[in-house]
Image (cartoon, rainbow, N blue to C red):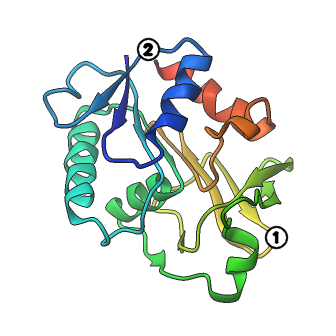
Amino acid sequence: MIGIVAGCKEQDNYTRWLEHYRLPYRIIHDEVEAADVPVMIFCGGPDLGLVPERDALDQRIFTYCRARQIPMWGGCRGMQEIAHFLGAPLIQDLGELNAVHRSYEGKQRRHMIHLSDGRTMEVNSAHHQAVAEPPFACDLSARAEDGTWELMVNHAQKIFLVQSHPERDFMWGSEIEQMCIGWIKSHA
């Protein structure tokens, strides 16, 4: 049973994604509901600080998962907050780079990322904040051509962070989506 932290306005994207792969899930509203999940998904959403009750829930679930070594996958806001909870500074606004990294209504902006293992992949973007530096040594990482961190993976800490939105149905089957769902399945 995969956990999805409650409060994401686009939660349906995540549930459809897991349903597509026939992966059972539960929406997590507190630590009690998180007790028996093998992996936790932290979703995208508004910037940290804009919805204090969501920030507080995410912090509590993160702390609970961290203490019990429950694997955590974070997408977009999920990447930013998990990295921030681990001590990483955030870039609050990418400024001129928003043209590359911010998706506007009705558009599906995509760009290439360069992985530390030499591969390149196309990802979709929908953010104007970013992680300034990884909070841990990465086993695998990726950056956009402008240097923005797009992927941070640490196997020992059981953390997979991605800046894009592989859960959106138009990304299903893409390399980044397959990498993400493969990691989630391997921990479920």
Locate residue 181: give its quadrant.
top right
Residue displayed at 17% across by 37% down: 30
Q: Position of residue 167 (x, y in %)?
A: 61, 38
Q: Quadrant of the N terminus?
A: top left
Say which label, 1 or 2, has the lower sequence index.
Answer: 2
Q: Position of residue 124 (x, y in %)?
A: 73, 54
Q: Label 1 belongs to which residue?
A: 145
Q: Where is residue 8 in the image (x, y as percent from the top left)?
A: 39, 47
| Amino acid type assigned to the residue bearing label 2 in the image | Pro
Residue displayed at 54% across by 23% down: 18
The total of numbered circles placed on residues is: 2
Residue 113 is tagged as none
Residue displayed at 32% across by 47% down: 7
Residue displayed at 76% across by 72% down: 100
Residue 24 is tagged as 2
Of marks 1 and 2, the one in the foreground = 2
Find the distance from the CA under tag 1 to the CA under tag 2.
36 Å
31 vs 97: above or below = above
| Amino acid type assigned to the residue bearing label 1 in the image | Glu
Secondary element type, mark 1: loop
